[in-house]
Image (cartoon, rainbow, N blue to C red):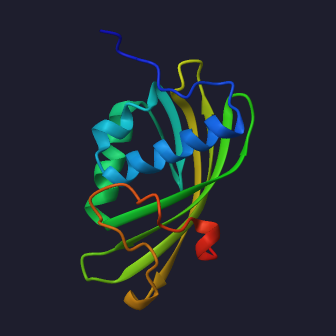
Amino acid sequence: MNANPSRPPLPPFTLETAIAKVRAAEDAWNSRDPQRIALAYSQDSAWRNRAEFFSGRPAIVDFLTRKWAKELDYRLIKEIWAYSDDRIAVRFAYEWRDEAGRWFRAYGNENWEFDADGLMRQRHASINDLAIETGERKFDWDSSGPRPLDHPSLSELGL
């Protein structure tokens, strides 16, 4: 079995395939399954997430495991911003709560670069957190799975 199976859609991207890639990433992250998510990245994928720099699938799994131990009831929406042959830029927002029950909405941008097999070889993320009241939450689907197709996008929510 190939240790690095391809992850369609593959570059070069069209608007349609770039949007599909963004939605696939959103759905995977909403699973909160670090092992599953890491398979979308190349073996040596290089990341910058906020002020952390690391590379490789084991480091990705470690990072995501730590992330979701802190960011409870995580729900994410991604939206395409721009794309080219092998790159996609997205903007995103996610909501989460801490152990004390305080809610936050994180806003950010990611720049992605893919290899020929559709695996992400670089991910650069800039993220800011905003404390919100429970009544300000906008991401209200079941926390255990993907965003429903009829749930508003970031643009539709005015975010």
Residue 28: name its quadrant.
top left
Residue occupying image coordinates x 30% and y 58% = 68
Residue appearing at x 47%, y 44% in the figure: 25
Residue 124 visible to an observer of this rendering: yes
Q: Position of residue 155 (x, y in %)?
A: 64, 68
95 or 59: which is nearer to us? Answer: 95
Q: How many marks?
A: 0
Question: Which quadrant of the figure contains the C terminus?
Answer: bottom right
Can residue 53 be seen at all in this image of the molecule?
no
The spot of residue 34 in percent (x, y) is 31, 43
Q: Is residue 105 left or right of residue 92?
A: left
Identified at 35% across, 69% down, the residue is: 141
**Residue 92 against residue 37 in the figure, above or below:** below
Q: Decide if residue 42 is on the left or right side of residue 159.
A: left
Q: Position of residue 48 (x, y in %)?
A: 55, 46
User: Which residue is the extreme one toward the top?
Assistant: 1
Question: Where in the figure is residue 146, as x and y percent of width and height?
Answer: 37, 55
